[in-house]
Amino acid sequence: MTDPLPQGATIGILGGGQLGRMLSVAASRLGLRTHVFEPGAEPPAGHVAHAVTTAPYEDAEALRAFAASVDVITYEFENIPTEALDVLQELRPIRPGREALRVSQDRLTEKTFLTDLGLRTAPFADITDAASLRQALEVIGAPAILKTRRFGYDGKGQARIERPEDADEALAEMQGAPAILEGFVSFSHEVSVIAARGPDGAVSCYDPGENVHREGILRTTTVPARLSTAQRTDAALLAGKILNALDYVGVMGVELFVTPEGLLVNEIAPRVHNSGHWTQNGCTIDQFEQHIRAVAGWSLGDGSRYADVQMENLIGDDLDRVPELACERDTALHLYGKAAVKPGRKMGHVNRIVRG
Amino acid sequence: MTDPLPQGATIGILGGGQLGRMLSVAASRLGLRTHVFEPGAEPPAGHVAHAVTTAPYEDAEALRAFAASVDVITYEFENIPTEALDVLQELRPIRPGREALRVSQDRLTEKTFLTDLGLRTAPFADITDAASLRQALEVIGAPAILKTRRFGYDGKGQARIERPEDADEALAEMQGAPAILEGFVSFSHEVSVIAARGPDGAVSCYDPGENVHREGILRTTTVPARLSTAQRTDAALLAGKILNALDYVGVMGVELFVTPEGLLVNEIAPRVHNSGHWTQNGCTIDQFEQHIRAVAGWSLGDGSRYADVQMENLIGDDLDRVPELACERDTALHLYGKAAVKPGRKMGHVNRIVRG
């Protein structure tokens, strides 16, 4: 446990997308600055960060200069190259820590970690070649889904196997990358828990939200989620178990499948999460500030929910709806300042508040 | 009425203090960038602005480059030199407009404007010399307060006249600056209305807040204020009258004295206002976003109040209380990232929320 960062201290953020942008805004509320490291030009987070470094993750010199200019390092995505992390951690603490990244960067490691903790997941198997895929399909059965172990997001790097005969084609889609086969789970809906753990080990979970995806992309999160009281307790307990096992500091997104037999962990993300955006208008302290507090060595804040909220992502052309959305009652817009609209690109989100 | 600014457009902000900082954050929620113009080094708004120009208001070249880089210009304080505004308005629209600045930059002009509108103010008189001061004191009576017509804030540029014999000393304190004598008003408390007017002429008033000052500096604003229903209506109507008379675009702070005979206007500020900070945690759309919406040509948002709030300014050493405040329930911190603590310096504020 370290001293809390003082006014004017700087948090380094790896990644300059909308999550980094909203983390920067949250940092500003606490009197902290941010420095964003992002390979791409014109990152959305750059509009509200105090400093931006534009360089690839292979540029050790740029990484060192970045680390030297900040007090602590966090990130908005989990797929940071290991070599970059090696360079950075020589100079400054990285929060959440390396173990959380190691586990969540690899679907096989992640699922193994979760089952070792006694948590339930979809059935899975390590796939190294056509033989292991055939064998796994016999155990898990079809339909199943083949995924690259690393670097997948929003449905990318995945191939669905309807029948055993699809196996070869699916394997070819992995382009030789290490893969994992996951069985389908019969679930009624998906929820996620946004959980935070402070530098003192205190854990605080936001009320679970219910997620709806379309084409592999999150569309809406609604709180409260349809869960029994027992399921609500389960969700918080299992999230706490994960955070404690990793000696985690920061916010984590835990996606869960709701099944008649209980909750299954779909995946974990060691960062603020799209399904936690509703907290901006449903809680006094939102997920972004909670993450910054933990990373900065501050106490966690009050994350209790005071309203029902539906978060809807604005994707691609949804941006055209902004003029109407801006006039709706109890509706808060959160736009990312991306000038170029592309199909499937997250341009912003809207939180609709239902007060009791 | 102009087209609403699109994603990625830039709002120029004159002044880089905490108001500019929170305006920048609000702009980011709407996908807009900000460029801050500020003579002082290390402005708090610079932590969250996309660009900062550090130059004096006399630097016409810097002003022109600033204006050329933005789509519209607004400001966080009203005492902008007229010559700077002349340079800027050649290049970009200034919102709120020049008339609001002209009126509010000068206490005499402001009070005359208000009384011409049929609104009540404290008794006042133009003071040009010792003779006019003596004469005014005979009409208005003592105690009274002598103020410079321009450039006063947080109690600066003011001298209290307890008895007619204090007149010469008070006049000397004005250091030859044009002055105004204001009579004291017997009021029970002070409230303020944060009012917004959109580019289409729509007016929206936040619920009035009740202000408590100490040593000339605002300490707390509490909503709801102690007001009768009739007084609440009066407050909104008179604010609307002021905004319409100025063909105003943006947010204005209107300070009112509550007296047995009704509401008196104390002063108006053509900008977001310290007494409106509670809106950050009491309304879906806060005063900062409302101002940015208006200035950017967007529709005003939903400014209805959903909770009781007490805003408390954190001044100077109050910053030492942050570790405890950070742990309080229903409490939101808003810190300005100022590294140097000085007595009387506004370091942040805290909003305490009381839910119904």
Image (cartoon, coloured by chain):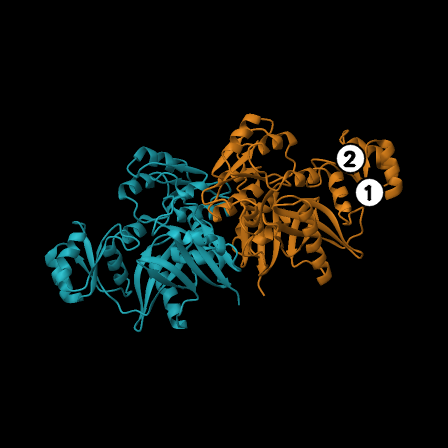
Chain colours: A cyan, B orange
The label on residue B144 is 1
- In the image, is residue A87 above or below residue A318? above
**Spatial distance from mark 1 to mark 2, Cα to Cα?**
13 Å
- In the image, is residue A203 above or below residue B336? below
Query: Which quadrant: the C terminus of chain B?
Result: bottom right
Indicate which label's residue lies in the foreground, 1 or 2. 2
**Nearer-the-camera pick, B218 or B279:** B279
Q: Chain of mark 1?
A: B
The label on residue A337 is none
Q: Can residue A243 be seen from the camera position used here?
A: yes
Reading the chain from its start, which is encountered first: label 1 or label 2? 1
Residue A157 in percent (x, y) is at 24, 53
Return the residue at label 2: B179
Q: Amino acid at mark 2?
A: Ala
User: Viewed as shown, does residue B210 lie left or right of A42?
Assistant: right
Query: Which quadrant: the N terminus of chain B?
Result: top right
Q: Chain of mark 2?
A: B
Residue A231 in percent (x, y) is at 37, 70
Q: Amino acid at mark 1?
A: Ala
The residue that appears at 84% across and 41% down in the rendered structure is: B162
Q: Residues within 10 Å of mark 2 (few under 14, many from 20)?
A: many
